[in-house]
Amino acid sequence: MKINRVNKLIEKMNEQSLDQMLVTSPADLFYLTGKWFHPGERMIALYINVNGNHKLIVNKLFPIYEDLGVEILWYTDTDNPIALLSTVVNKNKTLGVDKNWPSHFLIKLIENNIGKAFVNSSVILDRIRMIKDEEEINLMRKSSQLNDKVMLDLWKVLEEGKSEKYFASVLTEIYEKHGVNKLSFKPIIATSPNGADPHHETGNDTLKKGQSIVLDIGGIYNSYCSDMTRTVFFGAEPSERHAKIYNIVKNANLKGIEAVKPGAKFSDVDKAARNYIESEGYGEFFTHRTGHSIGIETHDFGDVSSINDDELKPGMIFSIEPGIYLKDDIGVRIEDLVLVTKDGCEVLNKVSKEITVL
């Protein structure tokens, strides 16, 4: 197991007077053990006890050949995993469980009185994972560096008459060329006016001269996600009005970045970007939060929104992605990932944000 991470978890459990918890989220299991599990309907659970009596309960369908540094309790499809779990849980203590753990497992725990009480303990790991350690920071840097290269290569293949879906398929090949074999999310490739839908479903519309195109892409490098958006123009300079809208979004992105420093709040970052767009008269067309945390998952716990007053701390990584969306006209979004440092922030994406015509 990742001992430093487990020790940090135990420290936080002690602070909250929680003696034991079950870790069942695949992302959390990977964070603590370094191994991915995808259990489907079967139960895989890492039992953590502040006294160190940890156990990993695994169905034999999922063989483990490496030494994970924790005792493994095996069961088969004809065994009762809840009965096995009951042999390790202290029934006189409160048990922490995952917020997304299937209810049929939790109901069986309750019915069998396995635990004095049950609490949602996910938030403990959620908040630990918000602050990346040095290993994670280096992986996130590398993941973003590769995403930069992929974005620039994608620009090179933009061609009149080709569809959004075509570019999405080529994008997968570009990622693979750079050693990235899995996407962080389904890419958003939106020619105008489709870019006015922030979550446009990449479709069959083709790229034409004079259009803009929103490219929201990300890949997974060594289990860590990248995410970046650029909006570029194809075949012709944008109109004066579209150029103005683009620069408003770019400046909002920069205002958000300027607001990032330890002690500031997530809401301060949102306010900096949002207030600028509002001051330029387009506030009603910025229809989503300014960003989200990212790491093992594309959307880790914590967002950049007006209602999140959590303080920024060194090691946090999140997106800053303001946008303006005008129906039947144009959509512009510019997104970077930023790392909070001790004296400000490091922008992980280096692809130009100046108006680009391809």
Image (cartoon, grey):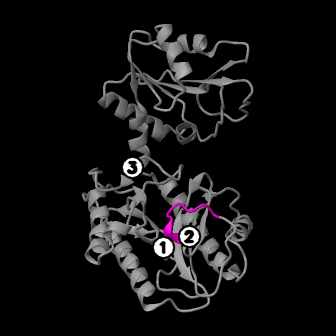
- Residues shaded magenta: 195-202
Q: Which amino acid, by three-letter code, is at mark 2?
A: Asn
Judge by depth and name the residue closer to the eye, 310 or 62.
310
Q: Which residue is mark 1?
A: 331
Q: Which residue is mark 2?
A: 194
Question: Is the residue 74 above or below the residue 5 in the image?
Answer: above
Q: Earlier in the sequence, mark 2 or mark 1?
A: 2
Determine the residue positioned at 43% across, 34% down.
Answer: 122
Judged by its main secondary structure, the magenta piece is: loop
Residue 93 percent across, percent down from the top left: 38, 14
Asked whether the residues under the numbered discs 2 and 1 touch, taking CB atoms below 8 Å apart as contact, a structural biologist would say yes
Front of the two marks 3 and 1: 1
Name of the residue lying farthest toward the front: 328
Q: Which amino acid, by three-letter code, is at mark 3?
A: Gly
Front of the two marks 3 and 2: 2
Determine the residue positioned at 57% across, 26% down.
Answer: 45
Judge by depth and name the residue closer to the eye, 34 or 302.
302
Label 3: few (<14), some or many (≥20) within 10 Å?
some
Can residue 44 be spotted in the picture? yes
Question: Is the residue 133 above or below the residue 67 in the image?
Answer: below
Judge by depth and name the residue closer to the eye, 266 or 37.
266
Determine the residue positioned at 48% across, 73% down.
Answer: 331
Q: Is residue 107 left or right of residue 16?
A: right
Q: Is residue 201 magenta?
A: yes
